[in-house]
Image (cartoon, coloured by chain):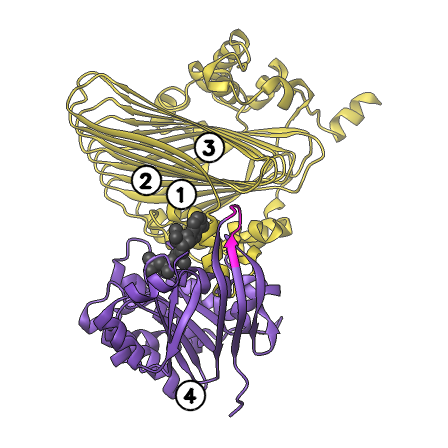
Amino acid sequence: MDDAPILKVAGLRAKVADEDLEILKGVDLAIKPGEIHAIMGPNGSGKSTLAKVIAGHPAYEPTGGSVYFRGEDLLDMEPDERARAGVFMAFQYPVEIPGVSIANFLRTALQTRLEDGEELDLFDFQELLMERMEQLEMDPSFAQRPVNDGFSGGEKKRNEILQMAVLKPALAVMDETDSGLDIDALKIVANGVNTLRRESPDKSVLLITHYQRILNHIIPDVVHVIVNGRIVESGGPEVALELEARGYEEYRKAHAA
Amino acid sequence: MSQVAAVRKPSRPVIGATAVAEAGATDPPWLRARRDEAWATYQATPMPSTRSEEWRYTDLSRKLQLDELVVAHGDRGPGAAAILPDALRRTMEQDRDSAARIVDIDGKVVSVELDESLARQGVVLASLRDAAREDDGDIRRLLATRAVPASDGKFPALNAALWNDGVYLRIPRGVRVERPVRLSRWVSRPGSATFTRIFIVAEEASQLSFVDEILSPDFETTTLVNTAVELFSYRGAQIQYVSLQRLGRGGFYLANQRTLAERDSTLDTLNVALGGSVGRVDLNASLLGPGAHSDMLGLYFGDADQHFDFNTSQDHVSPNAHSDLLYKGALDGSARGIFRGIIRVHEGAQGTDAYQTNRNLILSDDAIATSLPNLEIEADDVRCSHGATVGQLDAEALFYLMSRGLTRGKAERLVVLGFLGEVLARLPMGGVVEKVTNAIVAKLRGV
Ligand SMILES: Nc1ncnc2c1ncn2[C@@H]1O[C@H](COP(=O)(O)OP(=O)(O)OP(=O)(O)O)[C@@H](O)[C@H]1O
Ligand SMILES: [Mg+2]
């Protein structure tokens, strides 16, 4: 297996696009194919901002450093180009798209990944969608419901994983997908991620979470701690356990703004 | 010599008394008298101006020169149905499920097809001109008197005087027509004015859906299509009327629609405006008996300099009736959308349920939506609400879709389609939903 990182973030700085507010203050991170990295950090430390800058959200402006994905400069690409290249972000707050069914949405998303003139096979698609929904223990009727419209918090999170499972990205950034899930749902979601990795072991995951709990199901290779826009510690799964016991207080003191 | 020329080339009169006389040339006397009366009303009625509330945003003095138009007679000879224009033929081929079909070219019915079994059950579908000549009593009693009478205004009067042809449809008591009856209309002549009337009676406990689709090529000069729609649902009957306006640019679509819903009947309408340069629809839904129900749906999608103006009213004359209006529009380019709606709960109409919602999606800096919802309530035990929104494409939604790989264009199209599609989701008519969706998609592709 190739040992070059699939994602390499170096000295990344980013600010709010229409404000003079810097949020990421030099983030370094390298994820190799097949690795699972977890990021933990207090509220407001910049976790979602990091995820969104990787995905290309227009509300944030990178002001320094770089993000390379499979050797390509991600910051140079439009959000849809990044997605087609293999980056996926599961949103912390998934967006409602009234009137657009999950099936239609995912069909369109897969179609955009094909060459010009190539048509998605609708039967294959239907089969894939139903198989994935079954794995995630979602009722098939969900496929016809408008994306996230009127979904419960947990249903929205599960829908993010469904999309990931259908689109099979090389890198999935999961922003607090475990928040708001009951214990059974958490296991189902973790199972969804693990299934994907079993199918293709070189898929990588960047998993943002507040809870050590999910890391019992999705075992990370590396755990990072982010405080005030910087990664202040990286280590093995034990880092998460220590955090659980001690909280962020020491880090906060050491890395105040 | 000049006489010969006149015979070969039928006179094509402008709007005036001669045209009225010509339109009524083969009519029975009662109908000719009605046309003359309507013409008198037309002459006595001033042209609506932007000084009136109802026409404030559509300036006819700038958009419509009536005296430059030539009245269409649909004077194609027999066999016209055999040489249907390609565009019309294509859209007709998409209609896989039809119980009956009537084709109208330049304001004249050229073919009527009705399922044999329906004819046996007493369903009548005919050219309105033919039906009026034979008259079953109801036509004389109701035509241009109860629903869209000349007294309603300048254009209802003009239509009552000049209508050239149209549709007569009658569903007998208890007969349910499961598949839609379709009217396919085509306008070919630039600078023409077409006057059409649609007259539908659904007798007690009968049921039907009717799709009125109109197409044309683009025109360099303003080309008027004026349609009066008279819909009657008797006790316990169900009517769904769908207007699918897909005229070419240069088309000026002007419709007066009135629905009269009697006790326990359902009279739903859907107005889809995609084509033409100007579209103005006046729709009045009258709820005449307890248990009457009207869903009023509307969907418009304008680009370039298209101008769509909807003027609706929900008249709750009877207690315990229900009406629910939802009009949604997306506007791109420098398109203009106007929605003006009023719920009138008449005195004594207790137990009324009446709702009115207009939502607009603005896709460009120059597009404008104007929304004027209104309530007039003279009863105290009612449930009424009205709401209007004008919004832009949600940047978060676009990002969400793009983050799944959709290009910006695709993401925008999907959001617009979803936004408008919510209207169609309320219409339980498979064949129509698909058709309208395809028409929107086709238009979105062009954006
Ligand atoms: N668009 C924005 N405008 C202004 N401030 C913003 C914006 N986006 C983020 N911020 C601020 O940047 C900081 C980091 O936000 P971010 O959402 O990245 O935090 P987080 O680590 O994901 O927090 P949480 O754990 O609560 O999800 C916060 O203080 C937040 O208020
Ligand atoms: Mg966050």
Amino acid type at circle 2 is Ile
Amino acid type at circle 3 is Leu
Which mark is nearer the camera, 4 or 2?
Answer: 4
- Determine whether the residue tagged by mark 1 lies in a helix, strand or loop: strand
Q: CA distance from mark 2 to mark 1?
A: 8 Å
> Sequence-wise, which precedes: disc 1 or disc 3?
3
Circle 2 sits on which residue? B239
Residue B364 locus on image (x, y percent): 57, 40
Dot 1 falls on which chain? B
Asked whether the viewer can see residue A147, the reply is: no
B28 or B216: nearer the viewer? B216
* Residue visible at 82% across and 21% down in the picture: B2
Dot 3 falls on which chain? B
Provide the residue span drawn in magenta: A14-20
Name the colour assigned to chain B in the rendering. yellow
Amino acid type at circle 4 is Pro
Circle 3 sits on which residue? B128
Residue B208 drawn above or below residue A205? above
